[in-house]
Image (cartoon, grey):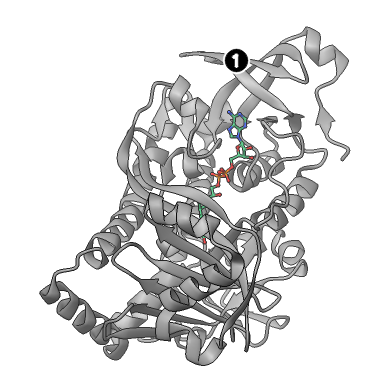
Amino acid sequence: MNDRVVDKDMKQQTKDFDAVIVGGGVIGGVLALQLAEQGYRIAIIEALHHGLGKTDPERVIALSYGSRCYLEKLGLWKAISDVGLGHIRHIEVREANNHGLVQMHATDAFLGDTQSGSIDALGYVVEIADMVAPIYAALEGKVTWFRPAHVEAMQHDADGVSITLCCNGETLTVTSSLLVGADGTHSQVRRMAGIGTHGWDHNRFGLVASVRCEHGHADTAYECFRSSGPLALLPLADDRFSIVWALAPQEAVRMMELPDRMFLKRLQRAADESVLPRSGRFESLGKRACFPLEFRVAKAYARSRIVLVGNAAHTVHPVGGQGMNLGLRDVVDLLAVLDSPLAKKDMGNPLLLTAYAEKRRADVLAVGGFTESMLAVFGNDLEWMRFLRSKALGAMQTIDPLKGELLRHASGITQLRKCSLVQLNQVVRYESTENVEKTGGDV
Ligand SMILES: Cc1cc2nc3c(=O)[nH]c(=O)nc-3n(C[C@H](O)[C@H](O)[C@H](O)COP(=O)(O)OP(=O)(O)OC[C@H]3O[C@@H](n4cnc5c(N)ncnc54)[C@H](O)[C@@H]3O)c2cc1C
């Protein structure tokens, strides 16, 4: 890759940028790209030499339709989708061993909306590495990379930020008006800025793996709530499912150790009638891995000349598949705030950063609150709660305005509008995957 990776001269002098971004994941990368394209001088400090690459099992993300529109606007979507995407055309939500089922279809996405149109999928399933690669390609020549690198020290005052970093064994200093923490859940920037977090450990692990089943997935994503935690099955491009199965620690250990055949039997039992009639038996299994599941929200998204985006600002349970989508909306809101004459003079102006923090709070609390309340409601084993849950799922399935609202949230259309990515009178109609007809202006 022909990046402007740190050169000899740079090792001997202090380099100045408008913004330094720590963390070159999807969120840091997308932010860097847009800022660089606006003419800002941007540096990225990334811990890994080549960034987040292919893993086995795959690190899979369900992107909402809203996120697709955004990535399309950035010119990244084609490269991401060319690698192969799972399409979520149907979603089924149910509780194991209880009545009540919600079924959502892409064709109904604008249900109850007078400015009706249709979309080809409610969401898309993509490997994180397949998002990172096109972003890095688009960044080529536009930003200064420091990788593999890590921050050793940082200072910030009213005039700017100074960061001492170690890159390829060399120590150097960079300065900037703004420092962005895009370095994930355990953000070093957040820690160094002295910003604490609210939240808790779920005392659960998300077991991820891919499975192939007898009849394929029919473009359907399943969310099956169980008292021990939800089991999600996402449709991959090659007709396998990617699973995220929330398990208590001891159960997670047992499930990691079971031979494949036994594991598939247990999974089949857990997936229950929600999947089996259509998909048939689970037949083969890829590698398994576990991630700790937690809910963390930074106590402040901005401090002095430092701002947090993506998982550095908030880590939500993967049950709703919202983490990445939320992070992309951070980027949209930060860019909106930075698109001002004040920012042209001083990107790290604390007034702007406070405005960003204010802007993000409601969305993060809504997503975090919804996710956590779903987990609490479905984690309760009381008989009357089970009864109420089945009634609530039944109501969502049958009452059109309620279901319409749910569909617009699941597909990210509501949030898309709040982010001003589409105006209310703009509708994107997907007649087929390739054939995109836009009415009423650009998205
Ligand atoms: C099991 C599981 C399933 C999920 N499923 C979904 C889903 O379906 N949909 C969805 O929207 N979200 C999902 N998420 C959440 C999603 O993965 C995250 O929200 C998203 O990856 C956050 O992106 P990010 O760029 O903020 O952080 P990350 O993806 O964590 O990237 C951080 C980057 O910073 C680098 N870095 C870290 N520390 C440092 C440091 N000190 N110095 C320099 N660089 C550093 C890392 O190498 C990396 O490149 C899931 C998460 C889990 C755990």
Is ligand 1 closer than 8 angstroms to the Cβ of mark 1? no
Q: In terms of image quadrants, where is residue 270?
A: bottom left
Q: Is residue 133 above or below residue 435?
A: above
Q: Is 242 situated above or below 295?
A: below
Residue 323: give x, y in percent of width and height.
47, 54
Which residue is disc 1 drawn over?
A: 152
What residue appears at the point 65 percent right and 39 percent down from the top-left corner? Answer: 24
- Which percent across, then down, holds residue 401? 29, 84
In the foreground, 191 or 400: 191
What is the secondary structure assignment of the residue under circle 1?
Answer: strand
Q: Residues within 10 Å of mark 1 (few under 14, many from 20)?
A: some
Residue 443 in view: no
Q: Locate residue 287 relative to residue 155 in the image: left or right.
A: right
Q: List x then y, in percent, for residue 379.
A: 25, 63
For the N terminus, the quadrant is top right
Q: Is residue 284 visible?
A: yes
Q: Give the quadrant of residue 319.
A: bottom left
> Looking at the image, which is closer to me, 367 or 443?
367
Q: Residue furthest top?
A: 12
Would you place residue 152 above or below residue 179 in this image?
Answer: above
